[in-house]
Image (tube, rainbow, N blue to C red):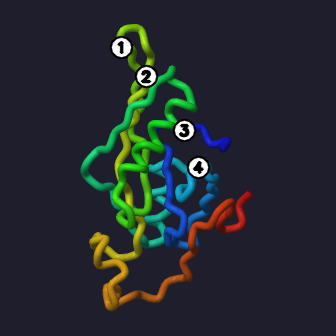
Amino acid sequence: MNTLLKVGTVFVQEGAVLPSEVPLETESFSRSWKAVSNLDGFAMGRKIEDAKWRFFYLAGQRSATAMGNEGQPAISKAVVRIMGRLPRETYNSLEVTQIVSKRFLGIPYVQVFAHARHVQEEMQLVAPGERSAPGARTMKPARPPAVTVTPATVIAGHS
């Protein structure tokens, strides 16, 4: 993975439905998550809102700690731990909100904080249990077709 992990980095679950107007470039990060390499959380939110979709920022900060200096390997380990703690089939995005490098008895470690995010077309946040229920999206406005994030895909023709 070539994406530099930093505050504002967004991860999107494989299979997430996103508006086709948002030019996302993703790189594989873990088994089911892709790192967005061309937009940070703020820019991605603006693009999604311009497409008349919603990018929810969910309460409840998540955190994880990894041993090592403030470098990409330690940050990656902590992010993977956060992803492992997220309930399955809930929200489709994650944004890194804070990275803190500390020492305890001379041993360096990194704490990473993140918030769950969710992309959807509806105005109100749809509960995870209702997303797959029949009739959960009864009134759908006519919009351009959405795209699904797949492995090693550049969306909207950007390279």
Q: Which amino acid does the dot numbered 1 rest on?
A: Phe
Which residue sits furthest right? 159
Q: From the top left corner, tell me how far across and down residue 12 is, in percent.
A: 50, 58
Q: Is tag 3's residue or tag 2's residue first in the polypeptide sequence?
A: 3
Q: Nearer the viewer, mark 1 or mark 3?
A: 1
**Identity of the amino acid at label 3?**
Leu
| Secondary structure of the residue carrying numbered label 2 | strand
* Disc ID at residue 104: 1
| Distance Cα–Cα, label 3 vs label 2 | 16 Å
The residue nearer to you, when weighing 9 against 21, is 9
Label 2 belongs to which residue? Answer: 109
* Marks 1 & 3, CB-CB < 8 Å contact: no
The N terminus sits in image quarter: top right
Residue that appears at 40% across and 71% down: 120
**Residue type at numbered disc 4:** Phe
Mark 4 or 2 closer to N-term?
Answer: 4
Separation of residues labelled 4 and 3 (CA atoms): 10 Å
17 vs 117: above or below: below
Numbered disc in front, either 3 or 2: 2
Indicate which disc residue 29 carries: 4
The residue beneath circle 3 is 5
Q: Quadrant of the C terminus?
A: bottom right
